[in-house]
Image: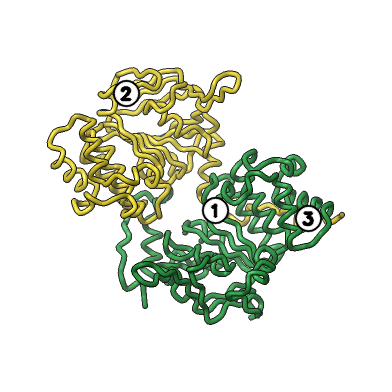
Amino acid sequence: MLNVDDLSVWFGQAPDRVTAVHDATFDVAPGESFGLVGESGSGKSTILRAIAGLIPGWSGRIAVDGQAQAGDRRDRAFFRTVQMVFQDPYASLHPRHSVDAVLAETLRLQGMDRIDQRIVTLLDDVGLGRGFRFRYPHQLSGGQRQRVAIARALAAEPRLLLLDEPTSALDVSVQAEILNLLADLREEHGLTYLMVSHDLSVIAHMCDRLAVMQQGRIVEILPAARLRQGQGSTPYTTQLIAASAGYKAEVARPLRWPPKTGH
Amino acid sequence: MTEPLLSVRDLRVTFPTRQGEFQAVRGIDFDLGRERLGVVGESGSGKSMTGRAILGLVRPPGRVEAARMELEGQSILNLPDRQMRAIRGGRISMVMQDPKFSLNPVMTVGQQIIEAYRLHARAPRAAARDKALQMLEAVQIRDPERVMDSYPHQVSGGMGQRIMIAMMLAPNPQILIADEPTSALDVSVRTEVLHIMDRLVRDRGMGLIFISHDLNLVAQFCDRVLIMYAGRVVETLPARDLHRAQHPYTRGLLNSLPRLDAPVDRLPVLERQDSWKGL
């Protein structure tokens, strides 16, 4: 479904060019859910944005459904196959467009027919129901907004969803609802997911395989089961698993405290 | 039991709205000793508002009321601004969520720490500079001289948060209120920041109020936990017993977290009950 070979992504022009991703290679099979994890600045979201055509400067090969992509131009067929859900549902919805307007515009752009009927179906699909159709974003909670963002992504009937930290702006109870919704939709619509998160347990819950990234490089690709067993084959993965297991007071090293006084 | 550092009874924070009065905090009681007290809840549960109310940071038309709000026996409820300013930063400090928004972008880190320190300690400039350097060293910043002359945008998020902690602790406060101090940080940096705070509480006998939405973190990091829902405390328990919590809300929150060590097909979803809201 998705092939990424030797992908390097950069920002800016030489001499100020900053390379954010170095030689990333991975494949996502149809129907698979693949995760990208890493800390901020590791390049995980950058990969997603390069695939979606939001970044012009990259080299290597990105192929979706066998179709190689170039630069930051994507044709209409691409967006009927690939859609993206962003991290912050407070920023990704137009504040003055109602849910109806958001979905209707997307459907029209995709050249869909029976728009009225499709809006109702989409709202049902994401568990909102038609009562939400004429609401504006400020009348919705964070979880409901993210459901609208997911409905908008589904409007094109895509097969690959790019999910950029879809739950990190939400409370844990709402996160559980959205993760369940994404799992259900994937099953019902036979979707493929490429999901970015800094939360290892979210990725382990949602994905079959994942790539661990550090400073723009993929350090290893492993099945989620191995992550759960804490079996990274590189020191970085092991360290990341340990750090996300939480806080252990015993490992707190003594600080130099009180600081030496002398002035 | 020794006298608590901070004692709060029936704290209420009210905001007038067009639909009538809205109570963000609806009568909470707690005592803080020389311990790490976790305050957990979802957005809108009133946990941050509790922290702000203690520091007198609720702006009109918001109102803070309490039967008692005492710092070592002295009432700090609705003090005049002048007196509150002496306490805020001096005896009670606060570290906010995102260092990007709490540091002044057009002042160097050093200037900011020195300014904060001199406001409370009335020390000469040179002494304040020494103190700032020591504080940066204390929070494990490797090259304090260089960091002193940097602007906030030149330092990373984790370093920014350590700078905030250094600044807040320079006047040697008795209580530190940390509002989601690690939510904007990566896990590895998070561990660093936490154990700096951990050592400070243990070595200096400070009281820490740790506001967070992260139950597992609080269970591991704090001594005691208050669980808030809709402006009230629904349950108080020792942090190590959090996983044996009784209240259905606490249980629901714990269950809704995906866990690395215990895979499930579907995450249990929290079913909210009106009865949790209490009176």
Figure colour of chain A: yellow
Comes first in the chain, label 2 or label 3: 2
Three-letter amino acid code at the position of disc 1:
Gln
> Which is nearer the eye, B107 or A126?
B107
Q: Is A125 placed left or right of B27 in the picture?
A: left
Where is residue A20? Give x, y as percent. 52, 28
Q: Mark 3 belongs to which amino acid?
A: Pro
- Image mark for residue B97: 1
C-alpha span from label 2 to label 3? 57 Å
- Check the picture and name the quadrant holding the N terminus of chain B: bottom right
Residue B245 image position (x, y, % from top left): 43, 68
Q: Most extreme residue toward the right, as rendered?
A: A263
> What's the residue at 53%, 61% (across, down)?
B211
Residues tagged by mark 1 and mark 2 found on one chain of the structure: no
Residue A64: numbered disc: 2
Q: Mark 3 lies on which chain?
A: A
Q: Is residue B131 above or below residue B156?
A: below
Q: In which quarter of the image is residue A77?
A: top left
Q: In which quadrant of the rendered image does the C terminus of chain B lie?
A: bottom left
Q: Name the residue under label 3.
A: A259
Which chain is home to disc 1?
B
- Give, as a three-letter code, the residue at label 2: Val
Residue at (40, 28) in percent of width and height: A54
Q: SS of the residue at dot 3?
A: loop
SS of the residue at dot 1?
loop
Q: In the image, which lettered chain appears green?
A: B
Q: Where is residue B80 shown, x and y percent of the image?
A: 63, 73
The reply to whether dot 1 and dot 2 touch (C-beta < 8 Å) is no
The nearer-to-camera label among 1 and 2 is: 1
Q: How crowded is mark 1: few (under 14 residues within 10 Å), some or many (20 or more)?
A: some
Residue A236 % position (x, y): 55, 36
Q: Horizontally, is B56 left or right of B241 in the view?
A: right
